Image: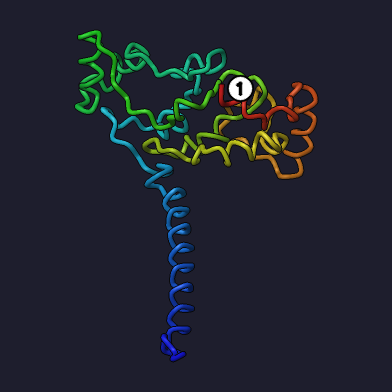
Amino acid sequence: MPQIFHPSANTLSRLSILVALVAAAGSVTIFYLIMRSPYQTQVKVIPTQPIPFPHEHHVRGLGLDCRYCHTSVEESSFAGLPPTHTCMTCHSQIWTKAPMLEPVRQSLASKKPIHWQRVHNLPDFVYFNHSIHVQKGVGCASCHGPVQKMALMWKDQPMNMEWCLTCHQKPEAYLREKRDVFNMEYSPSEEEQLSLGKDLVRRNNVPVDRMSNCSVCHR
């Protein structure tokens, strides 16, 4: 029987398989990179806000505590956004004519809240409670980053499941005393942190064995 395919067909078939494998691997790699890029995670992306609120000035410069504006963070699942009258506590006395604060003055006069763009916004299928994290000793900076250095607020961590599990599986690397939860300059050595963290896991009854259970965050 005469040969149907030229011998070069073997080379072409092998090359086709190789190209298909490279294309598949490349597609997976590109998808992986996109999912971890700022385009998807929004890490370090500064959203446009109605007022350019400088955390650096208020936290580091003036020494305001997080709880002055985020009043419900210790007892609610939501940290809370400051109402207009909180801003006007100071700005009715200082910078009263500043153009950038006109939306604040208009909000107070019209009694309509300022519509801030949320920087940290978890999907609807994820349950998150600020109060339990604060009560167990998770510092603000662990999730929100060095807010005291941010001229404008950005998302410091990806806040995906993989990132959350790094703490849920080894909380001793992150927990601190409750008095230091709102301390933005907290910086113990790795050895000090692990020693304190292990003690806090025990003292605060942190259920490490259950914290990786799906139902903890997906309810």
Location of residue 78 in the rendering, given as x and y in whole percent from the top left corner: 48, 18
Q: Residue at x 46, y 30 (%)?
A: 122
Location of residue 188 in the rendering, given as x and y in whole percent from the top left corner: 68, 40
* Residue type, mark 1 in image: Val
218 on left or right of 203: left
Q: Residue at x 62, y 35 (%)?
A: 186
Say which of 150 and 47 sits in front.
47
Count of marks, rendered view: 1
Circle 1 Cα neighbour tier, 10 Å, few/some/many (<14 / 14–19 / ≥20): many
The type of colouring in the image is rainbow
- Is 118 rendered above or below residue 156? above
Say which of 90 and 161 sits in front.
161
Location of residue 54 in the rendering, given as x and y in whole percent from the top left corner: 36, 32
**In the picture, residue 69 is in which quadrant?**
top left
According to the picture, the residue beneath numbered tag 1 turns out to be 134
111 on left or right of 178: left
Callout 1 secondary element: helix
86 on left or right of 97: right
Q: Residue at x 40, y 32 (%)?
A: 119
**In the picture, residue 105 is in which quadrant?**
top left
Image quarter where the C terminus lies is top right
Say which of 216 and 52 sits in front.
216
Say which of 177 and 185 sits in front.
177
